[in-house]
Amino acid sequence: MLSQSATYAIRAVVELARAEPEDWTGSRSLARRLRVSPTYFAKITQALVRSGILEAQRGKTGGVRLSRPAGKIRVIDVVTPFDDLTPARQCLLGQGLCSDRTPCAAHYKWKEAGTLIAEFFRNTTVEGLL
């Protein structure tokens, strides 16, 4: 359902939510804990910084941390830089964009499931995943 990048992003943000809010966590050490390549993980953290989920600080005592309390970060905000959970996403059967007007065979069931999943991500905060 979610891309690997979105999954790693959720795991990283949850891990950072467990830390003290004022503490910086080194990206390399976080990547090791999550068992992700540091190079790949750097791209994920950069996207999260650009989207305002994380803040970053360079230097020996730097790293990343949440930009606001975990209770104020919705999971949809963590996923959005990596995956599109909007109703107009790609067709499950690969027919491009399908809609209620031009549905594929799976459209209505897939739309129903997608709506429930998107609702979960919209209504769940990072704090709720701790």
Image (cartoon, helix red, strand yellow):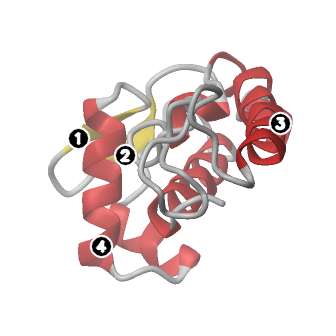
Q: Closer to the N terminus: mark 1 or mark 3? A: 1
Sequence-first disc among 2 and 1: 1
Q: Mark 1 sits on what residue? A: 57
Instruction: Please name the residue that numbered disc 3 is placed on.
Output: 112
Q: Quadrant of residue 54?
A: top left
Q: Earlier in the sequence, mark 3 or mark 2?
A: 2
Residue type marked 1: Gln
Q: Which mark is residue 88?
A: none
Q: CA distance from mark 3 to mark 4?
A: 33 Å
Q: Which residue is mark 2?
A: 64
Q: Is residue 40 left or right of residue 15?
A: left
> SS class of the residue under badge 1?
strand
Observer-side mark, 4 or 2, equals 4
Say what secondary structure mark 4 lies in.
helix
Q: Residue at x 51, y 54 (%)?
A: 9
Q: Are marks 2 and 1 in contact (CB under 8 Å)?
A: yes
Q: CA distance from mark 3 to mark 2?
A: 37 Å
Which is nearer the N-term, disc 4 or disc 1?
4
Q: Earlier in the sequence, mark 3 or mark 4?
A: 4
Amino acid at pointer 2: Val
Q: Which residue is mark 4?
A: 40
